Amino acid sequence: MQGIHNADLKKQAIILRQQGFTYPMIGIKLGVPKATLSGWFAGLKLSKNIEGKLLRRKQKNLVIARGKAWVVLNKQREDNKKIVEESVGKSISQVCFDDHTKEMLLAMLYLGEGFKRVSVVGLGNSNAKIMSVFVNLLRSIYNVPEKKLTCYLHLRCDQNVGKETTYWSNVLKINKSQFRKAQFDKRTIGTKTWKKYHGVCVVYCADAKIEKRLTVLQDLLLKKLLS
């Protein structure tokens, strides 16, 4: 009886397969494992129409599976981000951001991103937050006069100088008169710039004392961290 039952299931499975049903669909409908179906369908020839139908279903299911996986992965990332934010937030809340701490942060930022020139402190980046931190720290720690701040923009060829100057002037709260002639990257001729890109802004502060102080502070911090 069991053999007759299996033979009947096999016939049903083959008919469904020839109609364009996928392995999972047949397995659910008949309660037959995939391994068994693979044996039953060995050497089974399908029409080009059915093969195309199965391929389209497979591609559709793959898109759906990827979508579900992305949702799960994104949820995991968000959960992990919240955990990290809570942990880091507690640590930051215990830090006293006085001028001494700010100066050490500025020294390390300058060490990693700054231009090493004698008597001049300079830093360039396309990230508005990084540039804002740099300029704000110079102002709050050393009370730098605005006339000592000079800006240069490095843009792609299809960018508008006036528009980008206005953007960076507003972000950094530096008067447009402090901006010098922009430089264009000729390698970008004929290519389109993405909307949120505003070029690289470079800010120089001509102050030998600040440059010397940050340089010495960098060396001392590195020695301390490596000791």
Image (tube, rainbow, N blue to C red):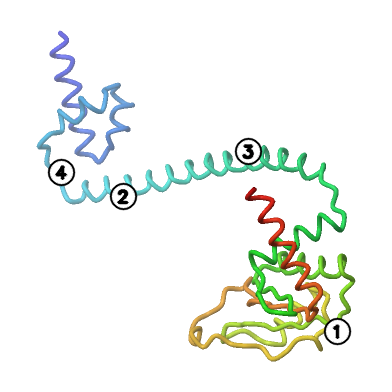
For the residues marked 2 and 3, what is the alpha-carbon distance in whole angstroms? Answer: 35 Å
Q: Earlier in the sequence, mark 2 or mark 3?
A: 2
Q: Residue at x 90, y 71 (%)?
A: 143
Instruction: Where is residue 115? Give x, y as percent.
Output: 65, 75
Q: Residue at x 22, y 26 (%)?
A: 35
Kindly identify the amino acid type of the residue bearing the numbered disc 3.
Answer: Asp
Kindly identify the amino acid type of the residue bearing the numbered disc 1.
Answer: Lys
Q: Quadrant of residue 127?
A: bottom right
Kindly identify the amino acid type of the residue bearing the numbered disc 4.
Answer: Leu
Q: Earlier in the sequence, mark 2 or mark 1?
A: 2
Q: Is residue 153 left or right of residue 70?
A: right
Q: Residue at x 25, y 28 (%)?
A: 34
Q: Earlier in the sequence, mark 3 or mark 1?
A: 3
Instruction: Where is residue 68? Give x, y as percent.
Output: 48, 41
Closer to us: mark 2 or mark 3? 3
Evaluate if marks 3 and 1 touch, with contact meaning CB atoms under 8 Å apart. Answer: no
Judging by the rendered image, the residue that carries numbered circle 1 is 147
For the residues marked 3 and 1, what is the alpha-carbon distance in whole angstroms? Answer: 46 Å
Evaluate if marks 4 and 2 touch, with contact meaning CB atoms under 8 Å apart. Answer: no
Kindly identify the amino acid type of the residue bearing the numbered disc 2.
Answer: Arg
**Circle 3 SS class:** helix
Closer to us: mark 4 or mark 3? 3
Judging by the rendered image, the residue that carries numbered circle 4 is 46
Evaluate if marks 2 and 3 touch, with contact meaning CB atoms under 8 Å apart. Answer: no
**Circle 1 SS class:** helix
Instruction: Where is residue 165? Give x, y as percent.
Output: 73, 83
Closer to us: mark 2 or mark 1? 1
Evaluate if marks 4 and 3 touch, with contact meaning CB atoms under 8 Å apart. Answer: no
For the residues marked 4 and 2, what is the alpha-carbon distance in whole angstroms? Answer: 15 Å
Judging by the rendered image, the residue that carries numbered circle 2 is 56
